[in-house]
Amino acid sequence: MITPVKFLGIQQGFGGVPAMELYTLLEPLGDHPAGSTVSRLTLEKHGATAVRVDLRPPSQLSQPWNRAPAWSSATKRGGLN
């Protein structure tokens, strides 16, 4: 099972809290509705692992001025990546 997400960026840590990767869910995950912002830890608590995938067309991959954030997907452990 694949849960599609969009990588938003990294929230800087503060005090004793470490930096964390943030994702937007494109479909519900557990009790989190689509559109929610979740951390990598939340994905992992639901048995998913973040996998970054660049979905830009090949013609755009070599254009340095067009480096939009890559889309990602979170795959259930044991699923297809």
Image (cartoon, grey):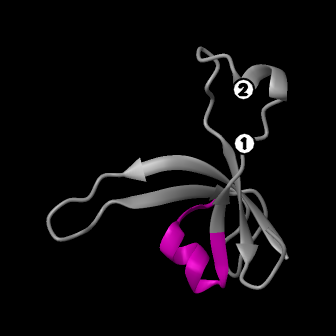
Q: Which residue is mark 1?
A: 54
On the image, the x and y values in percent for residue 18 come to: 27, 66
Q: Is residue 57 left or right of residue 16?
A: right
Count the marks.
2
Q: Which residue is mark 2?
A: 61
Location of the N terminus (image quadrant): bottom right
Contact flag, marks 2 and 1 (Cβ < 8 Å): yes
Q: Residues within 10 Å of mark 2 (few under 14, many from 20)?
A: few
- Most extreme residue toward the front is 62
The kind of residue tagged 1 is Asp
Instruction: Check the image and report above or below for 14 versus 1.
Output: above
Q: Is residue 24 left or right of residue 9?
A: right
On the image, the x and y values in percent for residue 77 come to: 71, 83
Per the image, is 54 magenta? no
Q: Quadrant of residue 63?
A: top right
The kind of residue tagged 2 is Leu
Q: Is residue 18 left or right of residue 70?
A: left
Q: Quadrant of residue 46?
A: bottom right
Q: Which residues are magenta?
A: 36-49
Between residue 71 and residue 57, name the one nearer to us: 57
Residue at x-position 73% and y-position 61%:
34
Residue at x-position 54% and y-position 76%:
42
Residue at x-position 24% and y-position 69%:
17
Location of the C terminus (image quadrant): bottom right
Between residue 31 and residue 8, name the one nearer to us: 8
First reached walking from the N terminus: tag 2 or tag 1: 1
Question: Which numbered dot is residue 3?
Answer: none
